[in-house]
Structures are given as structure tokens and as C-alpha cells.
Amino acid sequence: MLGAPSDGRDLKPGATAGSTDGRRSRAGRAPSNYGSNCSTAGNQWGCIAYTNARVANSTVSTSASISTQPVGGMPYVASGKLLIATKKEGEYNSWCSASLIGKGILVTAAHCVHDYGKGDSGFFKSFRFIPANNSTSNTGPYGSWDAQTVWIPTAYKNGTDTCSTTGIVCNNDVATVLLKKNSNNQYPSNVSQIGYYGYGWNGYGFVKEKGGGRKSSKRSAITQLGYPSGLDNGALMQRGDSYAKYTGSGQGKSPLNLIIGSQMNGGSSGGPWLVNFGTASSITGSSAGKVPNRNVVQATTSWGYTSNTIQIQGASTFAQNPQFPSSSYTEGGRNYGAGNIGALVKSVCGASGSNGQALGACF
């Protein structure tokens, strides 16, 4: 469960680096650019097909600026780069990725804001969010926003989370962040073109697949966004598409995670995993499907392999688990959701937490 205000409410916000992202996902040279390239050595899951590409307009002339221009507008601009000062406030020496799930509310990985198990002293010093970042500067095409409040699960802060290895591949490597308004008294989604994603829990958008005599499993098509250091040196947003599947039970040393195929590495941590990504088409003669809500974040990138031949990444899924068993975290008649994500959003938006809803930062 979430702790008292010491869980980050009065802490100046921070995260792991693009160069040391997630311990198990330390950046190396970029993997070979093959959608199904992987190795079974040290990899219990085998190969998972994927595609990865820069999120930018295609180069249609000799101008280098065209190929580095980010796609404007939603749904991409709700994602961005999260700069982190791990040692001194305002001195950004690393980065992660993050996305908006409210007008001024981010979701990212807990290891991007805190050193696992270090308690109150484990929080990093400060953070800056840059939507749709397209350069190495500390400001972006839409501006930048500093963090005001950070919330992480107490189990992650105290080092008691369900993890396969201490601090790596855990049930609850998830964090929410309340941003400060900019100099124009705006949250990101008060700026033209910037919106925010929905968020889901307990497998929204996942379906059971059967075949080959194997036990049914839940899978979904996932779009991953982030700023990995091995692709364009972390300066430009990258997109990955893969199918995701569940692994683990959530109990003992078997955390409940999602895994996908991915070429991303250090710096991509905290980036969103979305179902139904993109702008909805006008539908004729068909239906929107069983779970039609678009641009729904289900998890954030948490870990990967240091070997560049095992192109798989994992995430702490937004779900009920032993640390967050409730199917509904509610306050004042509002349901913030189930499991870890419901508790975290309630803490940053609810009246008994940061009261981001009253500040106009939430929905």
C-alpha cells in the first residue's frame, strides 16, 4: 500500500540514468535491427517478434531537420523524456521516459524516481518532463515542466516488493508524478495539441488465445514509446510494436509482469505500453471492437537484458497483486481504478493525497 507523505509528497523529485536504466537494462550498443532477432541463451521466453522505428516524419529531402521533426499532436505528444538529477537538484545527469495520464500527471517507472529499498533517502533530487522531446536540450517543442510531487509504492520504497531479483523485475515498479505549472500557469495538457492518455488495469485490451493444445493465455497488441539511449542517442522518441504476454503469478519470487519484444534499452524505462494506440478511424460496416477505448496505458517499461541479443523488455503491469489487492481505489465517489495504478492515481489526485484534482492537474 502507499505510505504517508514521506512517500514523496514533500520531496523534490529524480531517476535512474539512460546509461544505467533499470540495472538489468543497462545501455550497451544498439541491438541489430531485425524484428525477430534474439537469443535463447539466458532467455527463458524465446523470441518475440517486434518492430521499432523513430517517431518522426520521413526524410523527403536532404534536410536533416525533417527527419528529426517529431510528429505533432496526439497521441504522441502525451509521451516525453523525463530528465533526472540524481545527485544535485537541477543538474540533470540521466533520463527515463514518461507519459501523461492527466493534465499534469505523469506515470513512469518507480526506479526512475527512487533507488529500490532505500527508504526516504532513496528519492532522486529533481525531474523535468519534456513532451515529444526532439533534441538533447532541456526544453522541447512544447516546453518543459518540473516535478512537484512523487508517489511510489511503499513496498518498492522499503524494499519488500515481490521481485524475482532484489529491485529487478518486480510487481510494482510504477510511480506517479504531479507536475508544477509552467511560467504561463499551465499544465502540459492546457497547451494546444497536448492531451493525455487513459490508463487501464487487470488486462484491459487483452484476450485469451487458444491453439496447439496449449493452455489459454492472455495477449494483446502493444505500442511502446520511449527514449532509449541506443537509438538516436536518446534524443528522439522511438516507437515499438509487439504482442505482450503475461508472466509470473505475483506471488513469492514470481512477479506479475508483461513482456514484449523490443529493441529499446537504457533510457526507455518509464515509457508507456499502450493498447489501441492511434487516432480512431470513422467506421462503416463494422464495429469498434469489444474494448474500444483508445490510447490506454497498461504498464511502463521496467527492465530488459544487458545482452543486446536478447531483445525482450518487461514491465510491472497495472493490476491487482498482493501489495495492492483492492479492485477499486475510490474517494469522494470517484473510482481511480484497481491495483497498483488505482492506488497511485488516488494518492496523487485524491483529496487525502496531493489533491491534484482540486489543483486542476488530473482529469
Image (tube, rainbow, N blue to C red):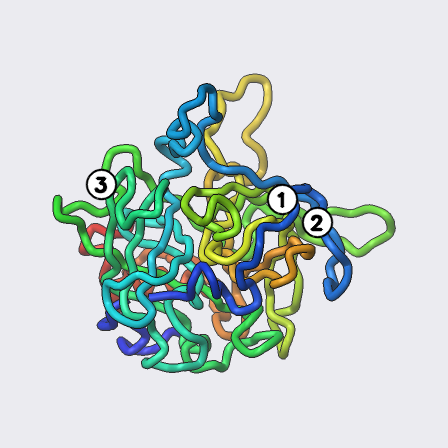
Q: Residue at x 78, y 47 (%)?
A: 210
Judge left or right: residue 68 versus residue 240: left
Find the distance from the CA under tag 2 to the CA under tag 3. 38 Å
Up/down of 4 relative to 15, above or below: below
Q: Position of residue 113 (x, y in %)?
A: 37, 67
The residue wearing badge 2 is: 48
Looking at marks 2 and 3 on the same chain, the residue that comes earlier in the sequence is marked by: 2
Q: Amino acid at mark 3?
A: Asn
Callouts 1 and 3 close, C-beta under 8 Å: no
Callouts 2 and 1 close, C-beta under 8 Å: yes
Q: Position of residue 291 (x, y in %)?
A: 55, 40
The residue wearing badge 3 is: 190
Q: Residue at x 56, y 76 (%)?
A: 162
Q: Amino acid at mark 1?
A: Ser
Judge left or right: residue 256 versus residue 72: right
Up/down of 361 relative to 320, above or below: above
Q: Secondary structure at mark 1?
A: strand
Q: Position of residue 16 (x, y in %)?
A: 42, 66
Observer-side mark, 1 or 3, equals: 1
Q: Secondary structure at mark 2?
A: loop
Find the distance from the CA under tag 1 to the CA under tag 3. 32 Å
Find the distance from the CA under tag 2 to the CA under tag 1. 8 Å
Q: Residue at x 47, y 25 (%)?
A: 59
Looking at marks 1 and 3 on the same chain, the residue that comes earlier in the sequence is marked by: 3
Residue 242 got which mark? Answer: 1
Q: Amino acid at mark 2?
A: Ile
Quadrant placement of the N terminus: bottom left
In the depicted view, which residue is nearer to us: 296 or 316? 316
Q: Residues within 10 Å of mark 2 (few under 14, many from 20)?
A: many
